[in-house]
Image (tube, rainbow, N blue to C red):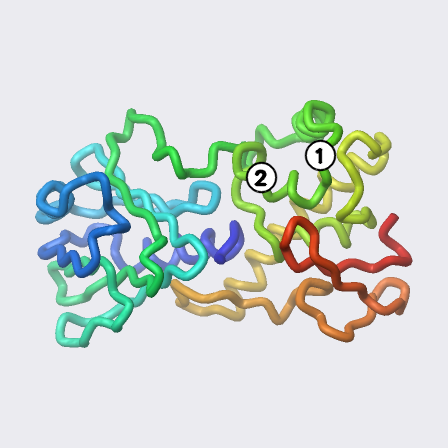
Amino acid sequence: MPELPDLTVFAENLAARYNNRTISRVQVVREKPILPITQADFIKRLEGKKITAVRRHGKQLVFSLDTQEELWVHLMLHGDMYALQGTDPLPGSACISLSFDNGSMLCFADRTTWMKMSIIPVSGNPPSWASAGVDPLSDVFNRELLEGVLKKKRRTVLKPLLMDQKLIGGIGNAFADEILWKAGILPQRTAGTLSADEISELHRAIRDVLQDAIRNIRTQGGKKITGEIRGFLIVHGKEQGTCPRCASQLQFSLLNTRGTWHCPSCQR
């Protein structure tokens, strides 16, 4: 599933392609992602409308329209986006396609149809499935805010806490591992066991890891709007890997059913 760094870059690349483009046709191949809105209403509220901006919100993408409405998209686990031309065939997993006034097309695809899409007013509440937690790269996400979250959830295991979209928006499995390694903290620790210094290290690691990841994905991903670039990660997914900080063998485990990598020596 794409996480905050991926979606930040996707939003930039989508904006470069589709800002100020008018949606000339909407094709609904599979309607499950847009329910409970009807197919007819979904099409009516998009066709003839211009995209004015694209941004990331937590783990979601938000397309601003010139009608003071927004198209929210959650790719979930298997969702993909394809930049096509009007003559290109749709992929077999296509759910929704948007055709534009310049002949280009944006296809949202998901073989499981788990992805979610909704149209809401700019002044309305985000969809119920959207990340509600604070954005970890926003100005309001300071050390004191993080400390407050940790104190409120003092019995919660750290890695699931970082991934809880109701608390912090945008961090998933891969970058939670990277953040905790950077901070030198075991993923199995509970929030209430962190010292003041460890809270500072965790806050610094969250910002640094996510910002570094955005830079890496921009450099390595080019104009990508789908997929995951993970070759630059230090610990997550490194089967038989060693810790670059202390040369110990990295350890894999399941934590709340999620594959987790950490260094048993220098993460404490």
56 relative to 124 in the view: left or right: right
The residue lying at 66 percent from left, 50 percent from top is 176
The residue lying at 49 percent from left, 58 percent from top is 1
Residue 80 visible in image: yes
Q: Tell me where residue 256 appears, x and y as whole percent.
A: 66, 49
Q: Tell me where residue 252 appears, x and y as whole percent.
A: 75, 63
> Closest to the observer: 18 or 145?
145
Identity of the amino acid at label 2?
A: Asp
Q: Secondary structure at mark 1?
A: loop
Crowding near the residue tagged with mark 1, few <14, some 14–19, many ≥20 C-alpha atoms within 10 Å: some
Q: Tell me where residue 228 appears, x and y as whole percent.
A: 50, 65
Residue denoted by label 1: 156
> Closest to the observer: 15 or 24?
24
Q: Which mark is residue 164?
A: 2
Crowding near the residue tagged with mark 2, few <14, some 14–19, many ≥20 C-alpha atoms within 10 Å: some
The residue lying at 41 percent from left, 57 percent from top is 10
Identity of the amino acid at label 1?
A: Thr
